[in-house]
Amino acid sequence: MIRRAALLAVVGLAIALTSANAAATPAADPYSPVMVVLDSSGSMKARDAGGPGTRMDAAKRAVSSMVDGLPAQARVGLTVYGAGTGSAGSEKAAGCRDVQVVQPVGAVNKPALKAAVNRAQARGYTPIGQSLRTAAAQLPAEGQRSIVLVSDGEDTCAPPQPCEVAKELHRQGIDLHVHTIGFRVGAAARAQLACIAQTTGGTYHDADDAGTLTGVLGRVTEKALRHYEPIGKPVTGTNDPTTAPLVAPGQYVDTLNSQEERFYTVDLKDGETLYFAGTAIFPRGNVRDVEALDIRITGPGGADCNKRERQLHTRAKADGGSLSTVLRWDELADGTSQSRTCDEAGRYTLRLTRDNKGTDRVPVELLVRVEPPVTGGKGDPEQAARVEFAGQPAGAGLAVRGGGSFNEATTLAGPGRYAETVYYGEQLFYRVKLDWGQGLAYRITYGGVPDGKTVNVATSLFNPVRDEIDSDTTAYTGNTMTLPYNGKPIATTRVMYLNREGGAADIRKMAVDGWYYIMVKLGAADGAGGVPVKIDLAVAGTKVNGPEYNTVDSTPEATPSETPTSSPSSTPENGSGTASGPIDGRATSDDSGSALPWVIGGAAGLLAVTGVAIALILRNRRPLN
């Protein structure tokens, strides 16, 4: 029996370590799928006043330029309308059905896309409404996806009316955004195209000449690729706590309607700490600007644990984006619960509520992490001093492409300067790996742009369990400016486990090693373009001893989930590698090295059979009570 128990313990540890190592694998699809819809109607034969050739020639050059700039991981297709028939009255019936998918949405094939657009000839009618239905049918049934529509006029085939089709798609609850570009359009066409974009949470842009069209199409398509795409194993919470689904550590996806309560349960052992988070994803054009996400916890037998977490998003309608609320329950670890039954092992129930007086349903990511008890040393003592810049980074910076979510955050692999273009309405994420004993500091500089829009800008720093450490926000008016606005960088102390024991609230959030997340946001505005951004990053400190977890008796059960994406363009050597520790769910090379090589190899084989994947991460927030 002793040998059998020891074998099971070793296999359990191997599964935990190997599952953690799997987290370093980049996600297969870091970008949202996009269908480009191109107008090939007869009016596109008109001469382009802003350049040589016709409007169609200008559109072909714009699409070719856009294709050249697509990232290798993009999934983009092409649909054209009006290319297969003429514009005579006798051809109208056929012309209004003339919508052709010339390149399906899939792994980007640049030569095929260019060849397809070059074959298109401007000839027929303008069935915009029908083209939207066709394009939407080509996109996946779930997840963030977008249509980018280029037209030089209004629909000539209604019904269906294009804006009614947009409303029809939105009512279906699919997370589909339509971005529209009006190429030398009049007032009626502009109003129609703007209505399509506004209804679906997309953006409308004017393009008055060939050069503008080329720039706008590239920027809009790139923006469409970078949405927050919810990731996780499907789960449906119930409205009755007695029938709530049991969720193991991992990442899940559910949906929430306005004022809706959803219940979930988690089993906890003695000494464990729970992190439970909900991240709601809002499209632009949401019902209300003010959104709230609320979490409460009850213990075994329905005992009220007297803990609630609630967070607000005050620009959900204008800017879209995401909102996370995280509840941390550690009374089983320290025994300080006000309710005696809430410091006992057993089944705990989490209630998630979305507070919004609307009718729309939005996706929500659920993150469940369970931290094992510390049965040995707690590591080196806390480090209260904040990290500072040793010298101001200089130069243009290393070009990076930010991810649209925590799951797709782009790795900033070491100290230095990074360069990015953030488009209006985007919320982008980057991650920095910190071992025990390391810390970071950063600042964001928004560059000046001609005719820049007046919008809000913001940045936030989150720890590996998605708890917001610090943030800053202000107005951007098109002039160069830096966040934080007071000139001081947003910074951590050195990361130590003992930071959680007393001290300031923000210091307690610097008690987990792993991936720290930087969010950069540029508010939504009508019009094309983006803003150049520089991210100056300092990383300081050397790795020290961390806590000694009981990973054998309290190994979290893994569930299928996706993992963050590492940007191939982020290549500085200092600070690279995977994060460690059971909270983040990743292991360093030290964790998986020579001590147990045969265990890791055997567990990898077992995982190949069982399909066990890594459980992602959470953050905690201070309770309201």
Image: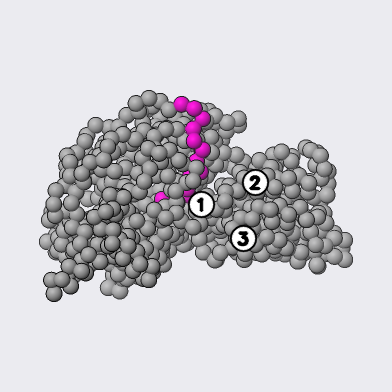
Asked which secondary structure carries label 1, the reply is loop
Cα distance in 3D space between marks 3 and 1: 17 Å
Quadrant in which residue 342 is drawn: bottom left
* Residue 584 x %, y %: 31, 52
The residue that mark 2 highlights is 68
Residue closest to the eye, 436 or 181: 436
Is residue 398 highlighted in magenta? yes
Look at the image and give the residue range highlighted in magenta. Answer: 394-407
Res 105 label? 3
Q: Position of residue 497 (x, y in %)?
A: 21, 45
Residue found at x 27% / y 32%:
386
Amino acid of disc 3: Val
Dominant SS type (magenta):
loop
Q: Is residue 103 above or below residue 417?
A: below
**Circle 3 Cα neighbour tier, 10 Å, few/some/many (<14 / 14–19 / ≥20):** many
- Quarter holding residue 126: bottom right
Q: What crowding class fits label 1: few (fewer than 14 Cα within 10 Å), some (14-19), or many (20 or more)?
A: many
Q: Which mark is residue 227?
A: 1
